[in-house]
Amino acid sequence: MSSPTRPEPTRTRRRWWPRILLGTAAVLASLVFGVTTASVEGSFGPHEARYDVTTDETITVDLGPLGTLQIDSPLPLALGAHITVQEIPSSFVQLDQATTLQALTGDLNSYAQFFSAPEATVRDVARALVIDAILRTLVALLVLVAGWFTVAALVGAARRDELAERVRPHERHLVVGGAIAVVVVLAASSGIESARRDDDAPAEAVFAGTPLEGARVTGRLGGVIDTYGSNVLDAYRENEAFYARADRAMATQWDITTDAVAAQDALLGGTDDSSVRAPQPDLVTLVVVSDLHCNVGMAPLITTLVKRSGASLVLDAGDTTINGTSVEQYCVSTFARAIPDGVDLVTSPGNHDSADTSAMYARAGAQVLGGEVLEVDGIRILGDRDPNETRLGQGTSAGARTAEEEGEDLAVTACDDEDGVDLLLVHTPWVGDATLDGGCAPAQVSGHLHRRTGPVQVGQGIRYGSSSSAGATLNEPTVGPLKGTAEMTVLHWDRSTRRVVDYQIVQVTPEATARVLWPQPWPTVVVPPTIIGSQLGAPSPV
């Protein structure tokens, strides 16, 4: 007689959809929390500011006791932003009215220029907010996951099974309702609706026809805008018109000069050493700028010259900012983003720059020299940040090294480099003297003096000093329409000889006109007989 078959134990079927739904709800809730609580510190024109994401469909600029400026947000999903403009940094209030920094603290042109090129600030802040939102999302998700496993461990497996059996008939409703509740609660708890939309405030008529059209103003700010708003807009329009005219003039003059050079070369058959031929495959084209001092109005002209010349490399010889403060982030970001895609940007920080602004420049895409040889597009470039730091109103202070000590360090690096240094890029010209004297770099590019010097032989190399690409003049602001003639330089460098072939000056005048000078051959180094003799092993003459 066969024994009865035992029934197999009933296996509890795993329900995956509740787990998937709960996991999705946790991710969504964490994402909502992360996005709606994102907050970063940044710059807003010449001021420091805090940016907070809001959920009130409004961009609000909060100027404290002055009031607010509100405009409908272009962001999706009812997102907005609250920008709390903070006090002017203490380093600014120490400056006298004649200095360039007046442009950042009191001159209307500074605000006009900021709003004429706000893309750099918008991108920097957007990137920082995205990073902050991601970090907050991850933290929130980790907290939810950790909380889930903590509660599960405290309850125990047996109790969890018992509770699961009790709620199974209502599982669908509980899971869906709980997921919705978590999302709603977290979204509400993020609660950054500190900048309430003020639909009752009338739109300012002065903003008509500008990017701020439709903006609403509250508090004392309304009176300020009524009084000075037209002046600001006039400065904005003047600034835009000036650099647009200058850009067109420069492009036209470049084309005229280039055609004339090509015509001469065709006429002479390329045999005249005084003519400079158009870029060839073995030539690298470089654009040199220096002492921009936060004049972001020149950014479009840099873009135009790089494109027109076919440059693959831009050299910035320093003093990109005015006082090396964090609020000047929009300056370095604007210049970095003026460089077309595929073109490299290398800079040697000047005495008006700082470690902070150099780091910002690097994040925006610049390659910042720091005492080591950098190879870009086949050119081996050496440089370092300026040994001095000059702060307007505070004078100049020496860094860890003197100019002479930094010069010696650069000379040692250049002379010991097995592959050789092709170009020395420094801000202060005489910092490179030791390297040039030793014949360890054939060419140097620098700035600092706000006037063009050279190219002239120094030691066994050629030194070239770029004038200010912002038209910087003594006791005049560099922000706004040009006060002096701005200069940029185009260089051609030969891959086969590893030498600069020629240089060409591009000038933009305070009248928004341009001059593109005829290309000039780069000087050839003349080696003194005493050095030739010592290199051949012959005794030097007494």
Image (cartoon, helix red, strand yellow):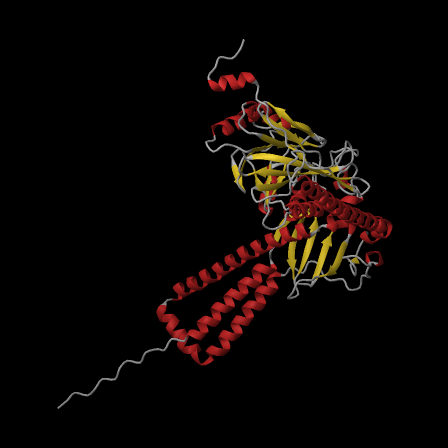
Question: Is 1 situated above or below 183?
Answer: below
In this view of the protein, which residue sits in the foreground, 119 or 470?
Answer: 470
Q: Quadrant of residue 253?
A: top right
The x, y position of residue 248, in whole percent, is 76, 48
In this view, which residue lies farthest toward the top?
A: 542
In this view of the protein, which residue sits in the foreground, 265 or 401?
Answer: 265
The x, y position of residue 165, in whole percent, is 40, 77
Quadrant of the frame with the N terminus: bottom left
Q: Quadrant of residue 506?
A: top right
Q: Is residue 468 left or right of residue 537?
A: right
In this view, which residue lies farthest toward the bottom?
A: 1
The x, y position of residue 115, in whole percent, is 74, 50
Note whether residue 383 is visible: no
In this view of the protein, which residue sits in the foreground, 294 or 487?
Answer: 487
Quadrant of the frame with the C terminus: top right
In this view, which residue lies farthest toward the left?
A: 1
Question: Is 286 situated above or below 209?
Answer: above
The x, y position of residue 343, in whole percent, is 60, 47
Question: Is 7 situated above or below 326?
Answer: below
In this view of the protein, which residue sits in the foreground, 142 or 539?
Answer: 539
Q: How many marks?
A: 0
Q: Image point 67% across, 36% down: which residue?
A: 275
In this view, which residue lies farthest toward the right?
A: 227
Q: Quadrant of residue 500?
A: top right
Note whether residue 192 is visible: yes
